[in-house]
Amino acid sequence: MFFDIGLAGVNAAAADLNVIGNNLSNANTTGFKQSNMDFMNVMSSSLNSSSSGTQASQGNGPSTSNIRQEFQQGTVAATQVSSDVAIKGLGFFQLQDPTTGQTTYSRNGTFQVNSAGNLVNSLGQQVCGYNATNGLVNAGVVAPIVMSSGYVPPTVTTSVALNINLNSASKAPPTSTFSPTDPSSYNYATSVNTYNTKGEEQTLATYYVYSGTGTTWNVYSTINAANSGSNDYVTSPTASQIGSLTFNTDGTLDTAASTITGVAMDTSGDTGTIDYTGSTHLNSTVQGSQSSTQSATANGNSTGYITGINIAVDGTINATLTSGQTNYALGQITTAMFQAPNGLRDLGNDSWAATAQSGVATVGTPASGNYGELVGSSLESSNVDQTTQLVNLLAAQRAYQANAQTITVMNQALGSAIQMG
């Protein structure tokens, strides 16, 4: 009993030294999160009662209560590896062991593509997210990402999405008959690249003509109009007009009164056939500013070989093809969130497992909500503050020495008592 307090102090200080030493040794470990030791005091009841009538108690030294990890952001540093990725903000990478099926979580984004097309870490654990088919991400089912490798076959364009603003001060064109070669016959034009069944790139142009009545605009479309003849005009629904747009008084699109149909191309074109029977989606506004295009995207891709990848802020893994295309989606990395990340169980190897204390993981898309953002060709450094840890190391060392001295003094006192006896 004489040595219990000093021994408890030595053990607590030794445990603290171990935690601090682990922090310092991992100061350069990618994605490492530093830990702190929590202590509590141990009380023991004496055999005597205090004058107040309540039983008196005295301290019986410290006890380690918990090793708590701190998940503050580490520094994001650029690398030269395109498959490296860092999380900026909250969230964890979700990994799956291909042998056991165990799911773990990590902040270490040192990844590579294996021979099977899986994105994996250094232990062979597979990175989870959404897979892609023909360059389109299939959101909804989270699974180990399997990416295409080598040759990419052509995929025909089936959907075009345009987000534009049209100038509400526009006047009806002086030329009543629309012609893509006559700029005076339309108010605004924009274009997007599409792909036919052979993987050939075709420019789909859309033209916007104010009708002169109310807030209605007519929409026309052509394929490669500048390079080929009139056979490339849209044939449905009427000539080259594919619909009309009507706007509300506040400038937003009146979707009920607006009609945009699928673009069915004339197959007798003098430059070949483009199989484009999909749909065109417009998200438009009319404001008192110049007409502009906020975004213009289309699915599909040309044929080619994958020469590299890049990871976007939302986790999309885009491939660069020999054809020059840079946005062919191979998959999308998702991130996981926990209600209480401090409740995660540290497994070592920069990974954690969910527990009842951490709660169940919720998975989402980076750059949305609280799921962080991804930074491609970068890694998150350890969040260990070496200066603070060195100061803590000195304090823990002094605590160890002081408690060891307590044992020495108690031993001397006990020896004196024995000699007196």
Image: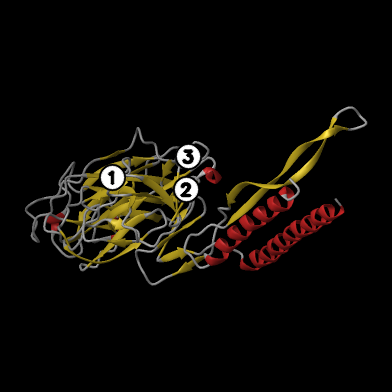
In this picture, residue 180 sits left or right of residue 405: left
Which of the two marks, 2 or 1, is nearer to us in this view? 2
Identify the residue at image location x=38%, y=54%. 315
The x and y percentages for residue 396 are: 69, 61
Q: Considering only order in the chain, which callout, 1 or 3, is on the residue closer to the N terminus?
A: 1
Q: Which residue is mark 3?
A: 355
Q: Which residue is mark 2?
A: 371
Q: Considering only order in the chain, which callout, 2 or 3, is on the residue closer to the N terminus?
A: 3
Q: Which residue is mark 1?
A: 138
Say which amino acid is labelled 1.
Asn
Please, what secondary structure does the residue beneath circle 3 have?
A: loop
Which of the two marks, 3 or 2, is nearer to us in this view? 3
The x and y percentages for residue 334 are: 38, 49
Identify the residue at image location x=34%, y=41%. 245
Mark 3 crowd level (few <14, some 14–19, many ≥20, 10 Å Cα): some
Please, what secondary structure does the residue beneath circle 2 have?
A: loop
Between residue 206 and residue 108, name the one nearer to us.
108
Identify the residue at image location x=52%, y=64%. 26
Q: Are marks 3 and 2 in contact (CB under 8 Å)?
A: no
Query: CA–CA distance between discs 2 and 1?
Result: 19 Å
Mark 1 crowd level (few <14, some 14–19, many ≥20, 10 Å Cα): some
